[in-house]
Image: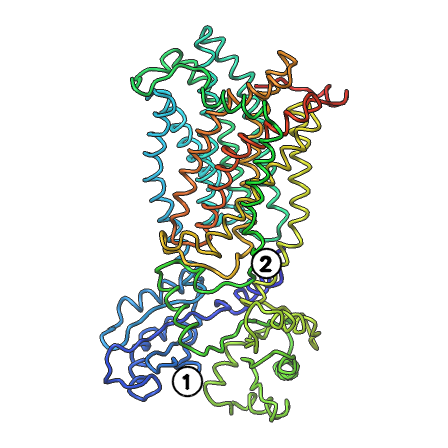
Amino acid sequence: MGTESQRTRQLVEEKFGSSPTNEIILFERQDSSLGEADSLAYQAEVSKLLQPLSSKVDSINTYTTQPSPSYISRDKTATYATIVGKGTGEEIYAALQDFANKADQSKLKISIGGIATTLEQTTSQVGNDLARTELITLPILLILLIFFFGSIVAALIPLGMSLITIVGAFAIARFVTGFIAIDSYAINVITILGIGLSIDYALLSVNRFREEIAKGSVDKATRTIIDTSGRTIFFSGITVIACLLALLVFPLEFLHSVAIGVTSAVAMAILFTVVVLPSILQVIGKNINALKIPLLHQNSGTSQFWTRAANLTTKYPVRTLILGLSILAVALIPLSQFHISTSVDYRWVVRGSSAQYVSRALSENFDISAPSLTVLNTFSATTNIDEQITNSCELTQRLLAVDGVKAIISPTLASPELSCDTQKQLILYGQVPEPLKSIYEQNTTAGATRYGIILDHQNGSPEAVRTLKAIRAITPNTGELLVGGSEADAYDTYRAYLDAIPIAAIIIIISMFILLAIQLNSLFIPLQAILINLVSLAISFAAIVGVFQFGWVDKLTGWGTVDGIVMTPLVLIAPIAFGLAMDYSVFLYSRMREVYDKKNQPLEAIRQGIIKTGPIITAAAIMVFTVVIAFASSSVLIMQIIGIGLGVTVLVDAFFVRLILVPSIMTLVGKANWYAPRWLSKLRIRHE
């Protein structure tokens, strides 16, 4: 059903056939002979430039049609026009872009902005970032895989699986678009997880196949990876999917598209790795190590580094845990300055785009009084014009009386000096002068009237929220009152996140606990895994604060800083990061379980689990980090935050959690790690 602001937007487009928000055309003086922006010569040039556009849009408002000081920049060198376009956002943007490309800009520089422009430029940039990232990361991943395996054949398999996975995931996504729109961010996240998880899973399978083939026949090695790695990958993938599907509890369509799109990528990674890859390995057989790189090739075996690390952490668990907690305390310090923002400014718009340029110019050089709320009154389409005008006039007066409302764009005259009867007579007898007549016609239709509310407070402030709530509390004389617009949309999205986060968290935690308990035949380890993975997530959020609020890498990247982090990237990061961390948990704990089942020695199970999976988890984390950090180079701030958040999560999980926290805690707990009641043991599954 969506939020109230989403319903308002949909109804406005349905009833008025136009975007509920204005697009902006910014004019900046190039020729000083035009004079100041409020001069006749300057405005005449603006009107001349806009003439070809007038037939392609619903309305154009400028300083000439509405002589308000807000249309003139503080330095008197610039002005702007507000455009109500025809058709979809894509069509509006195309019309504005065509206008800007064809206009003579020798006297006035033209830049376009607004919500439709921002969305279209963001979608375009996200697509460009995706193509660039794939072009850069795939060769790097191949080099890393060759370095890890020391064999070109072994290296090509995970990379090939990742490409097949992406193709399969996009095929499903294309099918799903017949039922739900797939958000542009979903496409990038599909790529991130599709490449990352398919390489993770293929790494695990190929590495185990190389271990087993060194001991025996190809057939036995294939059966072993199906019984061990295959089961681990299946459960690992199910845990990731469970995390992603928690996004469906949020009443926001784009999160649903992300959940469905990315789940398809994970499903493809599981399918191809568990079903297709064993057949490929069966055919390749002992040629898995073909095309060796002499200086890099290494036989399957244990890593001296991980052996020493496992011995050290299990020998001194208390010291190791104290060290880990100390590092954790320092790493989490930035969270003390963590600030959630409910509104966005030009810094959240695509860097270097015309939309960002216009947004920044308006915020820094103009005293803007633009509507931040859209009020829609819907009623029966058979309501006569006399009653409709009366209701509109009365509603206008009630809206003006709300504390915090600075001004209103209303179908009626919005004048407290004129009675409703007088205003009605002026409208009915066609005596309303321009531009008020156009405003009436643009905001009135059969069964609905529309109002633009200009607030007296900064967007996102507590005062603005109080005004929003007061307007929503108004009961119209007839029909239903809905409130949308940028301020309402930001608030509704924020509330939707806050209301859904506890439910999503409960779903993730309970599903993770149940799946891990069944997979590992233990009650303590699932609890430990959940708590430790929350640590990885907390550190990633701390890194986001440091990078984007404190500007740790600003001089290096030029990303700048923001006052607070909006909820959208955090909500996207949380289940994905938690799923990735849980993915590595399943790899590690499953190997420990296998050793414990064979030897019944808790300490040896911990050591062998770290030794055997340490190299593979590290390699997998480096691969995923390579992919997500490439996305962090995007010009879209939300993608930068997602890239940094996920990148930090996988590195922390691989080098801090698995190396320090897990072995020290498990060593101290001892045999109790593997306690399971009888009913759980009946559900026991063999492990990798």
Q: Nearer the viewer, residue 70 or 457?
A: 457
* Figure check: 527 above or below 638: above
Going 53% across and 76% down the picture, which residue do you hit?
443
Q: Position of residue 281 (x, y in %)?
A: 42, 16
Nearer-N-terminus badge (2/1): 1
Query: Is disc 2 placed on a helix, strand or loop?
Result: helix
Q: Position of residue 659 (x, y in %)?
A: 53, 30
* Figure check: 622 above or below 416: above
Q: Position of residue 541 (x, y in %)?
A: 54, 48
Going 31% across and 89% down the picture, which residue do you hit?
40
* Figure check: 431 above or below 153: below
In contact (CB < 8 Å): disc 2 and disc 1: no
Q: Nearer the viewer, residue 662 or 514?
A: 662
Q: Which residue is mark 1?
A: 65
* Figure check: 248 above or below 671: below
Closer to the eye: label 2 or 1? 2
Image quadrant holding the N terminus, namely bottom right
Q: Dot 2: few (<14), some (14–19), or many (≥20) neighbours within 10 Å?
A: many
Going 56% across and 56% down the picture, which residue do you hit?
337
Query: Is disc 1 placed on a helix, strand or loop?
Result: loop
Q: Quadrant of residue 42?
A: bottom left
Residue type for callout 2: Thr
Q: Which residue is mark 2?
A: 493
Residue type for callout 1: Thr
Q: Quadrant of residue 605?
A: top right
Q: Position of residue 404 (x, y in %)?
A: 61, 78
Q: Dot 1: few (<14), some (14–19), or many (≥20) neighbours within 10 Å?
A: few
